[in-house]
Image (cartoon, coloured by chain):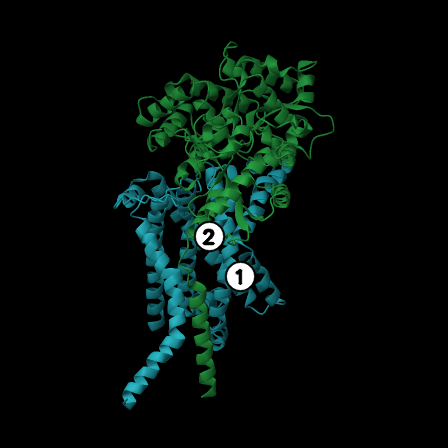
Amino acid sequence: MKKRLVSLLLVGVMTAGMLVGCGGSGDGEESGNGKEAEEGSGEVSISFYTTETGKDDYFQDLITDFESKNEGITVEYIAAGDDQLQAWMALYSSNEGPTVSLMDPINIYENQERMLNLTDQPLLDNVKKDSLSTLTFDGKVYGIPMSAAGIGILYNKAVCDKAVGGDFDPSTIKSRADLKDLLEKIEAAGAAGSCITGVNWSIGAHYLCQVYGAAIGDVEERVAYVNSIISGDAKEIDNDVFNGYMDTLELLAEHNLNKADPLVGDVNVDAAAFAEGKCGTWFMGDWAWTYLAELVEEGAEFGLLPIPYSDNEDDTVNQCIPTSYAKGYCIDISQNTEEQQQAGLKFIEYMSSDEYALEQTAIVTGQALPFENFTFEDKLSPLGQSTANYMSKGLAYDFYGTPNLCPSDIWYECGAYMCEYLSGACDRETLASKIDGYWSTQEAR
Amino acid sequence: MSKQAARKLRSVMQFAGFGLPAVFIWVTVIIIPFIYGIWITFTDWNGLALDINYVGLDNYVAVFSDATFITSFLKTVIYAVFTVIASNVAGFLLALAVTNGIKAQGLFRAGFFTPNIIGGIILGYIWNFIFSYALTGFGKAAGIEWMSTSWLTHPARALIALIIVSSWQMSGYLMVIYIAGLTNVPGELTEAAKVDGATGWQVIRKIKIPCIRNTIAICVFLSIARTFMSFDMNLSLTAGGPYKSTELIAYKIYQTAFTSMEFGKGQAQAMVLFVIVAVISLLQVYFTRKGAEN
């Protein structure tokens, strides 16, 4: 009898505990996802979700500095794993949407109804206007860019110097013919001319999306071209820009260090080969300094070359690099209180204007920063300086120009087609028709 | 209150005390998400949008008219057939080996089971390195051309690699179930067969296999269900590559929901997978019962 009483008591306690545990507060959204401000105390707790991976120490250092400069605000740091969207969606599903998120512009665009309109915020005064196009929807700004990422062909100056028999000047590469000449000279000097990391995100997003870039025209013309592909009025295979970039890809593939196994794609291995001079150039972007910094010898010089899509030396696009404002800070209004949103604004303002924050961002990302009070150009990586140099000369264009020019899954879907093409498993017509097929499932821009 | 009513009340209270917590957990963790999932299949929700529109059966129509989903399904069938055969044969042979009274058989059992307790993600990354660099390094050094390039960059070889690693991982798990079956085979039967002059192979074929028919049914159906739901190994070993040639059905669902942000369609694909796995599980129950009756 006693045993039964005890077990019944235990079961009762368990059940009660479970019900208490599972019972909601009933005021889910109002409470600001559990990070509620302590009324009257001036204390506010916010969360920051970042999809910029591998930079935990940097973010945590800045959060500590921000908290010390903004008494009463505490920031919970949440870093994305391999999949940036899944964790973000999980946080929103559990009513814990982050106050501030660092996301791709397309993700902010697709969820703009949840985001704070920053258009009239004073912090925008410090952001360079030409960096906001991918974060502006219907004339409203929903995000602040983190940095400007230059995309192009990285060159190892020592290898190129040896190849050209003197001081290599990157501005001499004005057409595909010039690039071909350089690659051949590098090979004659004993190194592979180029390197392509055969992964979907590199050739599927960074390389392929140039096809919808400045070579097509201004932003309106680019959108019109994409819409014509979506509607089926135009075909990729008939487009000179598409064919031009694919011709250049074939040129790079012909001199590829990974030619024997083009899809083995490992960015760390390729970075090591590039740093050691096993190849003279590498299709990547200035973020590659993250991989290179530890590998390069003191004093070694590296820079960025544009990707020419034609043999026309007078076409300035052949001398321009696309710069991508690939990540933007945004503030949630759907699951965060007014007070948390204000604290979130302070956090973004700190990240985009505080001297210490800008200096650390320049050092850690190595990339050019699109902020008016940015004065740490000397702290940028050699590749970041190269990007900044193109930007200052007006030889850079906004990669997408609009937030939704290319869909968020283009890197995966079309990346697979591009990998197939790079490996030689399909011809260009098949590639073009597969890309047309992908676009046909999209909605007009 | 009559005695009967009191007994009934006590029985209800006992159920409430002991059964309700389990039912509560089952409903909140399984049933409610399941119904919620079915509801999502009739919407165009992207996983985050505040506005949700009903699209009727559009997502199901899209699933069955999507050639890439059918392709993924067929690849999953090929993967499942070979993995189930390979892992069951290996599991059975390993079980035979470690139930024969060899020295340190406990150590061998633990060793063969270990791959199963290492997560699929970790195993995938380890084997990714082996296929991409270790084997290619050996191939280049030995001058073997087909081993000089990564297995994971060729569609057919990548699928074979996936089958090999999955079979290697699962065989240890199945081995444990086969061991349980084999140790239940009456010793006097095998002894009698040996006395009658049966060879080792005859003992296996005529005595052991018929005696563990139920175990075989459990292992086969368990491995079929597991291969159809295979995800982690697919993610870390091949990530669906090269060019989506090893995109199995569970991975395809994940990509649809989380990369393309088509939650409704992804959930509809998941429902199709659920039906497949449910049918397999019901068949397992049916055959296991039939085996027990026989």
Q: Residue furthest left?
A: B56
The green one among the chains is: A
Which residue carries the number 1 mark?
B94
Q: What's the CA distance linking mark 2 and mark 1?
A: 52 Å
How busy is the neighbourhood of tag 2: few (under 14 within 10 Å), some, or many (20 plus)? many
Where's the N terminus of chain A, which quadrant? bottom left
Eyeballing the image, is A231 above or below B260?
above
Eyeballing the image, is A192 above or below B7?
above
Does B192 sit left or right of A182 as displayed? left
Q: Chain of mark 1?
A: B
Tell me the shade of chain B. Answer: cyan
- Disc 1 marks a residue whose amino acid type is Leu
**Of the pair B27 and B64, the residue shown nearer to us:** B27
Percent of width and height locating residue A95? 44, 52
Where's the C terminus of chain A, which quadrant? top left
Percent of width and height locating residue A190? 67, 21
Q: Residue furthest bottom?
A: B3
- Disc 2 marks a residue whose amino acid type is Asn
Query: Residue A19 lies in what quarter of the image?
Result: bottom left
Q: Secondary structure at mark 2?
A: loop
Eyeballing the image, is B153 above or below B196?
above
**Of the pair B137 and A196, the residue shown nearer to us:** A196
